[in-house]
Amino acid sequence: MRAGVVVFPGSNCDRDAAKALARATGHEAVMLWHAETELPDLDLIVLPGGFSYGDYLRTGAMAAHSPILNEVIARAKKGVRVIGICNGFQILCESGLLPGVLLRNESLRFVCKPVRLKVENNQTDFTRLYQKGQEVSIPVAHGEGNYFAEAETIQKLEDTGRVVFRYIENPNGSLHDIAGILNEAGNVLGMMPHPERVAEPLHGGTDGATLFDSLVKAIG
């Protein structure tokens, strides 16, 4: 599996994601600068956490219009797997690859702590090595993680199994306790918690490693 990690000005979890991918795949990830307009052949593209473009205007809004996003969107439409983590989830929503929007946390405070999640759908390339209903602990670190969408969109996500992770302890006020969702085709995942921060024992937990291992299992 060949993976690439997009690096924006303000990204701060790109190297963490690259390390988690290297552990899972045995190969170094390709680091992709935001200004690039051409990408190598990749099986997976990661939009990492951080504060792309300083979170000016709106979180993820400027990154969604960066040169590299045109190619990321094109690859996603061709079936390449894409995962957006935290700020990456915000970028996916701002770019239209996922529905909805990430609003300010209900508390109006930045939240940084481990949270408990439930795996709602383990029939995806991102979750196939988890058990359905499994509880996992993965940290969050965000000020705008409050997922919102119109009622019709939320119902469609629920009815089609596109809610992949749900908060057991909701840290931000997200509707339906949503922590992670898929696109209709099932190849794009956005999630606010950081699986790369619990990808090896020295992190104090390995619940996030299963996501990367699931991708290796799915893609080969």
Image (cartoon, grey):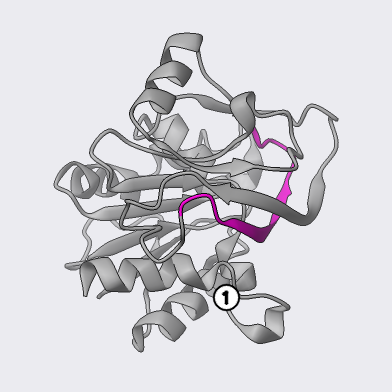
Residue under the point 37% across and 34% down: 161
Examine the image and state in which quarter residue 218 appears. Answer: bottom left
In the rendered structure, the answer to whether residue 50 lies left or right of residue 101 reads: right
Depth check: 96 or 162 in front? 162
Q: Quadrant of the N terminus?
A: bottom left
Residue 113, visible in the rendered structure: yes
Q: Is residue 71 rendered magenta in the image?
A: no
Above/below status of 194 relative to 78 = below
Residue 101 vs 67, above or below: the answer is: above
User: Could you tell me which secondary element the residue under label 1 belongs to?
Assistant: loop
Is 192 situated left or right of 82 in this image? right
Q: Residue at x 40, y 73 (%)?
A: 213
Q: Nearer the viewer, residue 159 or 20?
A: 159
Residue 63 in the image: x percent, y percent? 47, 42
Residues rendered magenta in the picture: 132-146
Q: Is residue 103 left or right of residue 3?
A: right
Can you give x and y, in whole percent of width and height, for residue 195 in the image? Answer: 57, 63
Number of callouts in the render? 1
Residue at image coords 60%, 26%:
176
Question: What residue did someone put label 1 on?
Answer: 199
Give percent across and percent down for residue 116.
70, 52
Sort mark 1 into few (<14), some (14-19) or many (20+) by Cα contacts within 10 Å: many
Residue beneath the point at 46% across and 31% down: 94
Q: Amino acid at mark 1?
A: Ala
